[in-house]
Image: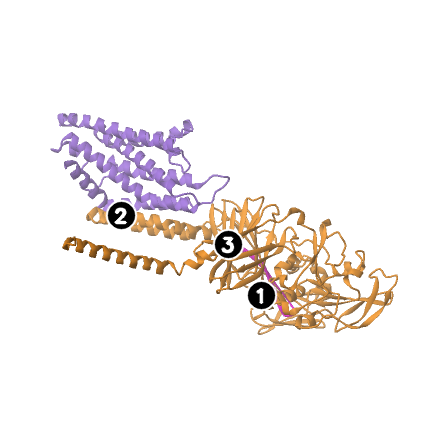
Chain colours: A orange, B purple
Amino acid sequence: MVGPACRTRSQAEARCSAGRAWCGLLVLLVFLPAAPSFAQAPSLQATLGWDGWTRYGTWNPLAVEVRTEGELSGWLVVELPQEFGRQRVRLRYPIHLPQGGRSSRQVPVWLSDLRRPVRVSVVAGDGTELASQEVAPQPEAAVGGVVGYLGIHPPAPPAQGPGGGRRVVVRLREELLPDYVAAYASLELLLVEELDERKLNEPQRRALQTWVLHGGRVVVTGPLRGGPLSSWLSVARELGTGAEAVGLRSAAGPLRELEPAGDARPVVEGSRTVAVGSRRGLGWVYAWAAGSQQVPPASPLWFLALPASGSREVPPEPESRPRLPLAPAAVGLGAYAVLWVLAVAAAGRRPWGWWWVAAVVAGSAAGMPVLADQVRQRAAPLEVRQVEVAVDGSARLYGWGYSRAPYAGNYTYSLPQAEAVSASGGFSEAEVTFFPDHTVVRVRQAAGERVTLYWEAEAEMQGWPAVEVEAGTASVRGTGVFGGVVFWGRRQAPLEQSGPELWVASRWSALEPEHPALLAFRWIRPEAATIVEERPVVALRRGDVPGWRVVVGKPR
Amino acid sequence: MKALAILRGDLRARLGTRKGVAVQLAVQAAVWLVGLLGTGPERGGDSPLGVASVGLLVVVAYVVTASAGSEIAFPGEKNVLDLAASPFSPRDVVWGKTASNLAFAALCTAGAWPVLVFLHSLRGTPWQESVGQAVVMLAVSWGFAGVATWLVAAVESEVSRSVLLWGGMVVLLAGAGLVGPWPWHPAHAVQPQAPGWARAICSASSVALGAVSLWALSRRIPRLREAV
């Protein structure tokens, strides 16, 4: 029986199912674009240290590779435990990858707790964790010194590293060399037997060069051919293979015949040139006449090439007393008081005034956390000390920030663009976000705790005054000079203004070893006193923050 | 409804007049000052938040009690003696004064509450703590207001009344605290870290004090009428 009622019901059912189909299609259309992010999580691979070897209390490289099939926009997050797990430092790097993209970077991480794992994760923009990995540093893999080599023959340096710890030799590959200079801090020496520059990207090449210019040491044990970095590392010409080394302490076996190139100097033992060394900024590049395995651990060449162990001093912590941030508190609370009185006066005259009273109380209570955050930030300013060091056209910035929390809570500090940041002192959590043009550190502290931040960055050479050093006189040309001092030999001279944008140092006196500029230079280079004996060092007072700009001149 | 008329009249006098606005301005100035003092950094584990909380309690309790006890006389406000001479029944008078004391105490507590929220946010403690503190403030100030209302009817001499009222308050707020560290004492119960049971006992006993005072007032009004 097919009656009108039945037909009506079946038409309604048909309309209903068509509606359901449209709804289903709509849901699919809404969720389909989001589906790949759920289905295709990026893959993450992280390795810590130099082939797993790490050094305690300094920067170590953390190699992270991220691959994604879909588009990825979010954060690479590295969580470092500190102080027996009581503290946690979270480093956040922005990451943007196209479909099928791959990112490989070696970020510097400050290791001070080697018993707890470092957690690496990829987090989407909305905070969803897409992939994670825990890298557990082994306490027995923490060593006193690391010597890396590029090549196939492992060298044999002295077994004891600085501070009496074990020294290990690590075979490196070009691809694993750090992108950031700071990560080289845990590497004592790099031996280069072979170098394929094609495997290096521009940041890696620049980082290696900057590391050497700012104190790093490289030993070349084989012929280098190829690109600009190889030319830069070439300090000797090879004239051929010479006779066997007999009775030498430096090396055994056949030696290459080397001729110093440019301003390089030969290292001679028993009338044989066993090595050639050349200054590159504050660092050294050596060419050995022998292969790395021909140099025994007791060879003087090791003592020449390895950096002298010296502990770095840090700036004295300023005696900062928390500021009582009365002004913003007074203004904020005062504004609330005025609003309250106006609302209450209105409520006394008109019934609708009570709504105003309610709105003022609710709105003010909601706004008070914002006011409190402002007051808290002003109460704990970061006292900054910065030292910039320029050598042969390359400048690095080193900064220390000190703050004491008068209240418990979160504190946010803005730092210049940094490549590495470490936090120490009193705090429970620190989050460091590396933006392209600046760095933001958010620290959770209890009342009365002091936090110390330390950061390193590449500094722009633009705007630096030009320094000319001639016999007996040093002159500085440029804007933004606020006085300074020149150290040279065992003497020093104050910079005196002799014209617009021209400063001259000519009144020499005996060197003051405790001069503030020299002390500041010692925070970066423990051997600062030796450096100023060999070469002129111009220290310019910074105008923006307490600290110095140090220009290292050419050696005499 | 007559009780509501008393409530409306009291609030209009306490808020809608120039003097009422001036009193609110003075109260907010005191709250502002206490709030500023509360921003001091912690020293040796002592937080100024505790001191500021007691300060806010004193400010709120003072203004509510003084208003209820006619120590601050607002133009147009009818106190208990005026109302006793009016056609309102004792029950209406008591309920009206109960409501007006409660509304004014709630208003003054609400005025101080955002400052408590600010001090909690500043020190990273949960703002919800301030709600418990506000409840203590409300209960204590309403309790004192009840006593003050009763004293207006019970004590004829203004000087004696003032001495009794403020002497009693000082003894209760400051003196009793010296006797022992009673957690349920208002000066302790209003502290940010006070336990919930202490706040409950403090609030309940304050409400009981106010209720007993207002009950006594209801007994007093017929005698006042007989005397008139």
Which residue: 82% across, 61% down? A250
**Residue bearing mark 1:** A459
In the rendered image, residues at marks 2 and 3 fall on the same chain: yes
Instruction: Estimate how packed mark 1 is, as few (under 14), some (14 to 19) or many (20 or more) residues with alpha carbons within 10 Å.
Output: some
Q: Earlier in the sequence, mark 2 or mark 3?
A: 3
- Quadrant of the image for the C terminus of chain A? bottom right
Local secondary structure at mark 2: helix
The number of callouts visible is 3
**For the residue marked with disc 3, what is the amino acid?**
Ala
Q: Is residue A456 left or right of residue A220?
A: left
Q: Is residue B165 above or below residue A172?
A: above
**Residue bearing mark 2:** A357
The image position of residue A390, as x and y in percent, is 63, 66
**Disc sitting over residue A433 in the figure:** none
Q: Is residue B185 above or below residue B116?
A: above
Q: Magenta part of the protein: which range?
A: A381-399
Q: Residue furthest front?
A: A1
Which residue: 26% across, 48% down? A357
Q: Earlier in the sequence, mark 3 or mark 1?
A: 3
Local secondary structure at mark 1: strand
Chain identifier of the residue bearing label 1 in the image? A
Which of the two residues, B168 or A66, is positioned nearer the viewer here?
A66
Query: Rounded to the nearest whole Å, what is the CA distance between mark 2 and mark 3?
Result: 50 Å
Which residue: 31% across, 30% down? B204
**Most frequent secondary structure within the magenta stretch:** strand
> Can see residue A414?
no
The image position of residue A406, as x and y in percent, is 48, 46
Query: Rounded to the nearest whole Å, what is the CA distance between mark 3 and mark 1?
Result: 34 Å
**Disc sitting over residue A131 in the figure:** 3
The image position of residue A433, as x and y in percent, is 50, 57
**For the residue marked with disc 1, what is the amino acid?**
Ala
